[in-house]
Amino acid sequence: METVEEFLNKCRQSGDAAYSALRSVLEKLENPKTRVDARIFMSMLQKHFDSAAVSSDDFFATYHFKINDIQLEHSSGFPQRKKLTMLVIPSIFMPEDWSFTFYEGLNRHPESIYKDKVVAELGCGNGWITIAIAEKWSPSKVYGLDINPRAVKVSWINLYLNALDENGKPIYDGEKKTLLDRVEFHESDLLAYCKDHNIMLERIVGCIPQILNPNPDAMTKMITENASEEFLYSLSNYCALQGFVEDQFGLGLIARAIEEGISVIKPTGIMIFNMGGRPGQAVCRRLFERRGFRVNKIWQTKAADTDISALVEIEKNSPHRFEFFMGRTGDRPLCARTAWAYGKAGGCISHSISVYSCQLRQPNQVKTIFDFLRDGFKEINNSLDLSFDDDAVADEKIPFLSYLASVLKEHSYLPFESPAGSKRFRDLVAGFIKTYHHVPLTSKNVVVFPSRTAAIENALRLFSPNLAIVDEHLTRDLPRQWMTSLAIEKRDCSETSDMVTVIEAPRQSDLMVELIKKLKPQVVVTGIASFEAVTSAAFENLLNVTREIGSRLFLDISDHFELSSLPSSNGVLKYLAGNSLPSHVAIVCGLLKNQVYKDLEVAFVISEDEAIFRALARTVELLEGNTSLISQNYYGCLFNELLSFQLADRHPPAMREFDKKSTTKLIGFASSAVSVFNNSELSISEDDKKYSLIHMDVDQSFLSMPSPVKAAIFESFARQNLSESETDVTNGIRQFIKTRYGFPTNNSTEFLYSDYSLGLFNKLLLSCIQESGTLCFPAGCNGNYIAAAKFMKANIVNIPTQADVGFKLTASVLTKVLESVEKPWLYISGPTINPTGLLYSNEEMEDILSVCVKFGARVLIDTSFSGLEYDIKNWDAWNLEPTLAKFYSSHNSTFCVSLLGSLSLEMLTGGLTFAFLAVDRSLLTETTNGFAGLTKPHSTTRYAMKKLLAQTEQEAGNLSESVAEHKGILKKRSQRLRETLQNCGWEVLPSQGGVSMVARPSNYIGKHDKLENDDSQKTELGDSTIREAILVATGLCINSGSWTGIPGYCRFTIALQEDEFEQALDRIAKFKDFIA
């Protein structure tokens, strides 16, 4: 080893020379063969430093390093060590008030919090706190981490200085370990080292910079140990912008440290951070709380301030006020401007320095949320708010956000679900009722509805009774004409009626029973008063009287159904635990009692009669479209949480008594319902099928959901306290339909919203029915709309279309039809036609509308299946504004055009659904209750759609690129499907856009196929049998000519998941082989 004088002469030259000399010493310390000599040399160097006649600061200025002792009061290490010997160089963070306050805060915790734990210190500087933690509390391992490479080298030197005595011998603690066994130092940008090496931590502590670098460009330089001393010093003492909302307060680096810590800390782990209080205590606490932490301030002191002019400037342009104090003992906070003025006048100003300890309140769920955000969704991080005043709210919302994050991360689309409701959700409902109320239900007893109102209205439409008695609390949103009809004369209870008459009744069982006996209604819908709900007596009275009269009973238990681990006694469910539910009774339950979203509703109906179950599910499909999957998932999470800690029932279920059947004939389904159920093509269930089903018969896209959509969905739920302006989509929709279709709107235009366009269609259909209009459908329309109109008993006329024009509606054909129709309404799908995938041009629409003007027809243009046009060569895009301006000026009092649309396809939102209807207000004046009972999108859906609408106005961007990508995929698929069908003997009508196309099975018509469910006969293939034949033979679901309205032409949708599309092509070929 060189002499001390030779070493100091090297150090005298410059800071870089001193660092180079110290690094050489470290190399010798790291080598076991030279370690003892190197440590003895450091002892000699320290003695020289202690004996020098100059001050510590002068020595530091001369030799560019110094060695100090840091006193550790009340140390309990073994042996009792009162101080640490520490080396410091100019280019690293030096111990000062901040770090000593931090260590005092760490001392506030009991010894057990660190003992035998894996700990990391962020921004370790010269390593003194890392070493002090290891010395005092004996953790199993402490990682000192710093982005400054010189700090890491100095920390290693300090570790050897304190792990070995002056003679180079190891210092052992009570467990026969040295500091070298417990401590490691690594160069790391915050927790990068731990993440890269899969190190899970139990404690994370940090005292890292909170002051933005006055020279931001300096922070972008390459970090090496040979960088300038000035740069490395700024690296240790300042921070750069991190892209977090907390950057404005200088807390961005701490925010990033916390979020990185979430990924590497164990569920029971604790983070402890030293924080300057300039931004204010509330801001500091919120930094942790909005990320899902419970936070506790464990120590606080004050430090003097000097120049705060930059913070005064921030206050000028912001409502935020920073927090300073007069002197070190002041307790009333001052804003930066006042503190600056006081300081300028000679006063002493200070700010608080606090040590915060924080722990995740629901660690596994919060980890899942941040895993999702790190996966390309950092832009929505600033919207996340996991701070809750009420633990009950946190216990509900955080698990859902975790579930939503996992679904969006793991799945590229939201799956197809039966109209009866998500199988998972129905299983959870049945499981909850079975576990907590001992009623042995299954998913086949549960039908899901968008709301309680929808469930009740659908049930009444299903049976269409002459007379129904409905609880006065449940009639508010029912159609007005039902409530004003006076046709209550006695009729045969088994008959249905074209007009439902509803009588309101009080919610009290004895009064309800008396009314039932006197009026003998065919359907009763009622709840149970609170004072009668605890026992089953009132329910049994209603059962008996409705059985005796022959009335169907729908009993609402919404007010008494508790989503709780300790639900109150429920007389209805108590009865069902020991008795089967009679076939004439169904239980209705609306779920509104969540802690977070008071307007988020899902309802379910329980029936143990299979025919009722299937029929109610059909009403959802026909009248609503479906129930929002995300709403089902929200309540599904609540049920799942309540079931997750329950053991399986160890006792056999009680024997249930089977109820006596009614001796009086009950009302059956309405004739219109029976006709639609028997003759329309509705969705196919997975039940009892040989193959897993592939759905080429649903209007839903299963292509990958792009990142902007996932971000909008998650952000809508992550936000708290959404304002009305943030969820008002009307201006966005107005601009959207003007840009896409040139559709004009004005002050008389009403915008209505729902989850599905079918629900809006059915509500507008009521206007048509109410004015005795006739709804005209061109052949080649969406079969679901025609089936719905038939179910609603609308007057319908089918308009023939011709193959030579691609089965489009033409002005000449429309003229012939409307000549014989009174009060015509015309439904037309465009620009993209569902199901053919062809496009109406602007000129074609002008011709059609000119005919409608002539006959005073009301027109409903359905754009729900547009927006994904992929073959637009020579296509005349729509601009309806000049056309409609000309036609409206013709003063035909009845002609008007309404625009129906859905953003689900064009926004590529998968299972997130949103539909709109732009309609003239005059059409609504006579409509039932102004569309009361309409299922409206939740505020979170409106928020997400508003963000996506804003993005669609940008020609460039991730969403626009994704739409273009999807169009390319659909174009290629249409070509591949066309080739496959043609090779298998189908005549294909080429498509130009949308998610479906049609083809005629010309090689199969008239052939015979033996279906597996028929042991004796072969079935001739035709419009009425081709769908079932393909389904039975291959498990492929398509729509036949009965659905498309084009004789002989079947519908195929192509927006499937990639592997399912390939399987679909294989199954088409398989059917050809099967017939052969």
Image: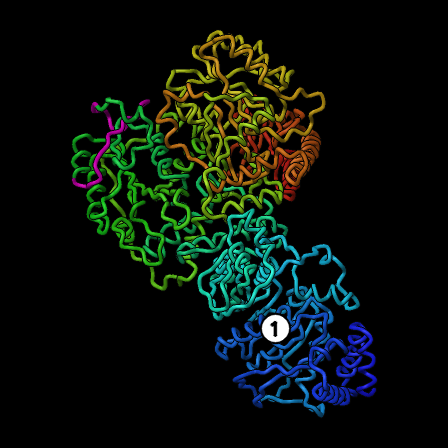
For mark 1, give the secondary structure: loop
Q: Is residue 984 visible?
A: no
* Side of 791 relative to 899 (left or right): left
Residue 360 picture location, percent across and down: 50, 63
- Asked if 53 appears above or below 850 in the picture, the reply is below
Q: Toward the viewer: 969 or 480?
A: 480
Q: Quadrant of the N terminus?
A: bottom right
Q: Quadrant of the C terminus?
A: top right
The answer to which image quadrant residue 22 occupies is bottom right
The segment highlighted magenta reads 489-510
* Residue identifier under label 1: 96
Going 80% across and 78% down the picture, which residue do you hit? 11
The reply to whether the magenta stretch includes residue 885 is no
Q: Is residue 143 visible?
A: yes
What colouring method underlies this structural image? rainbow
* Side of 140 relative to 538 (left or right): right
Going 31% across and 26% down the picture, which residue do you hit? 480
* Side of 980 relative to 81 (left or right): right
Q: Toward the viewer: 676 or 349?
A: 349
Q: Toward the viewer: 823 or 37?
A: 37
> Which amino acid type corresponds to the residue marked 1 in the rendered image?
Glu
The reply to whether the magenta stretch includes residue 500 is yes
The answer to which image quadrant residue 1000 occupies is top right
Q: Toward the viewer: 151 or 699?
A: 151
Residue 693 picture location, percent across and down: 55, 42
Residue 95 picture location, percent across and down: 63, 74
Majority secondary structure of magenta residues: loop
